[in-house]
């Protein structure tokens, strides 16, 4: 995994990323502390529901139990001696050699994992993850941000979005984008405005024009939601230049950036990895507009639901309050297992592991694309993804290449009748508009099944073209 701090471009900055800035601003000349946005700045962004939410008075006191010498009569915790699970052992693959070895939880680890814990996450894991953000993104403690753990990053996105948006607020949503976030935004009663993307990421020119021509009297956008690495469904990765332009627009037009990055560790592009928004904002004139969502679900276990958020502390506090009053806490056993695994490996070991994972998906992508060329050459068009698990391709459903078809009926009916299941492009747009695109995952299937699936899809497209010609 290429480190964010290794990217060469322009003038060097304190985080090691080399970029250019307009005007006279240089990070080295302006102390970081003076650029961190104050707590009061976020009052304009917090939703009314988050302002009304109060903390659970019992859960708020739980951290005091960890003070040395304290005898706690506080919580109604069940006695762990009554739990039926008495030991736990698993095999762990070495990230460098691939050799498996047994790892057993200690009695203290197991007792902790089976018990209630704090709503933010267990302190040892939070501390490890803060160190991971410094290792990967060059962000240290005391730089105006905090961190908490969640039941996957989707849990945290839901809570953060609800902490920020009220009915009638405006959210900018990159599109096409993961369809699972639409219900989250829709539930707040906000207005979702689609921002186009291409193979290089966010359409910054289109975003700028929309913002500069914003209707007078209409509330300005509060947030921009973006998936900058291996976007689901397109597989695109936003370039460094466009990331810097988005940060500039966020300052100029006063919105926050929701950086959802579940495919950060699945980057296999030929160019150096672009720095994250979280990295880049450290050397901006303002620090504190990026809310970053991380996930280890794609590289450790999707079923364990391993996610964490890095954001200004006031937003972290709002998310924790929401957790207190909804699911109380992320599962402790998940956290204990995750922490033990990560401590066994260390930061370098995790890096070695995710590099192997990225190489695995790189090979899967290449094999899938070779079969796409075999079966769909001339019948579909696509850009080769540089990260993630998906191909996003446009079906040519008529002889006229310029004609914009609609993949909905073809994929939902005709392809399914032939035994091929994929997702039509319309579901990845906030308004569900017509799209000739299709999303296909290359993460699981062996080559023989991919070959057969694409052969069947070829038949579907040819039949659709024949019907279009006869119409």
Image (cartoon, rainbow, N blue to C red):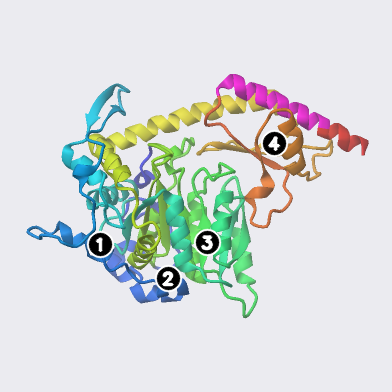
Mark 1 crowdedness (10 Å alpha carbons): few <14, some 14-19, many ≥20 = few
Task: Give the distance between the C-alpha atoms of the residues marked 3 and 1, in whole angstroms.
Answer: 25 Å
The percent position of residue 394, horizontal first and vertical second, equals 70, 40
Region rendered in magenta: 446-463
Q: Which mark is residue 142?
A: 1
Residue 438 among magenta residues: no
Identity of the residue drawn at 62% across and 50% down: 176
Q: Which residue is mark 3?
A: 224
The image shows residue 39, relative to residue 386, as above or below, that is below
Q: Secondary structure at mark 4?
A: strand
Q: Which mark is residue 423?
A: none
Q: Are marks 2 and 4 in contact (CB under 8 Å)?
A: no
The percent position of residue 75, horizontal first and vertical second, equals 22, 60
Identity of the residue drawn at 64% across and 22% down: 451
* Disc nearest the viewer among 2 and 1: 2
Identity of the residue drawn at 66% across and 34% down: 421
The kind of secondary structure the magenta stretch mainly shows is: helix
Q: Which mark is residue 381?
A: 4
């Amino acid at each position: 995994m290429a480190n964010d701090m290794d990217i060469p471009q322009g003038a060097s900055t304190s985080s090691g990323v080399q970029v250019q800035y307009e005007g006279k601003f240089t990070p080295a000349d302006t102390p970081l502390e003076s650029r961190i946005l104050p707590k009061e700045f976020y009052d304009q962004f917090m939703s009314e529901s988050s302002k009304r939410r109060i903390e659970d008075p019992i859960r708020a006191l739980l951290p005091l139990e960890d003070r040395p010498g304290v005898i706690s009569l506080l919580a109604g915790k069940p006695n762990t001696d009554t739990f039926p699970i008495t030991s736990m052992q698993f095999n762990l693959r070495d990230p460098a050699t691939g050799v498996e070895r047994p790892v057993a939880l200690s009695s203290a680890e197991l007792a902790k994992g089976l018990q209630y814990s704090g709503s933010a996450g267990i302190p040892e894991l939070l501390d490890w993850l803060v160190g991971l953000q410094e290792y990967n993104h060059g962000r240290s403690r005391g730089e105006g941000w905090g961190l908490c753990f969640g039941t996957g990053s989707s849990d945290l996105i839901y809570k953060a979005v609800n902490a920020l948006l009220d009915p009638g607020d405006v959210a900018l949503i990159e599109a096409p984008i993961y369809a699972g976030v639409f219900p989250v935004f829709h539930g707040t009663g906000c207005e979702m405005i689609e921002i186009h993307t291409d193979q290089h990421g966010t359409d910054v020119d289109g975003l700028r024009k929309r913002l500069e021509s914003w209707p007078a009297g209409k509330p300005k956008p509060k947030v921009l939601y973006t998936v900058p690495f291996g976007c689901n469904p397109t597989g695109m990765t936003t370039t460094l230049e466009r990331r810097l332009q988005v940060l500039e627009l966020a300052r100029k037009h006063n919105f926050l950036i929701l950086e959802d990055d579940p495919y950060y560790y699945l980057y296999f592009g030929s160019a150096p990895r672009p720095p994250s928004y979280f990295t880049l904002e450290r050397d901006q004139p303002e620090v504190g507009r990026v809310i970053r969502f991380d996930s280890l679900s794609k590289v450790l276990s999707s079923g364990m639901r391993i996610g964490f958020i890095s954001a200004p502390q006031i937003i972290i506090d709002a998310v924790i309050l929401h957790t207190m009053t909804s699911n109380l806490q992320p599962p402790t056993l998940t956290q204990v297992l995750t922490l033990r695994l990560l401590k066994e490996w260390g930061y370098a070991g995790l890096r070695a592991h995710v590099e192997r994972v990225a190489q695995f998906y790189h090979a899967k992508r290449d094999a899938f694309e070779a079969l796409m060329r075999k079966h769909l050459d001339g019948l579909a068009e696509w850009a080769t993804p540089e990260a993630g698990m998906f191909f996003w391709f446009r079906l040519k459903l008529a002889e006229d290449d310029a004609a914009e078809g609609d993949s909905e009926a073809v994929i939902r009916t005709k392809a399914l009748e032939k035994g091929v299941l994929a997702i039509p492009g319309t579901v990845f747009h906030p308004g569900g508009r017509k799209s000739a695109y299709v999303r296909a995952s290359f993460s699981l299937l062996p080559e023989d099944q991919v070959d057969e699936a694409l052969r069947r899809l070829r038949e579907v497209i040819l039949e659709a073209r024949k019907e279009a010609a006869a119409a």
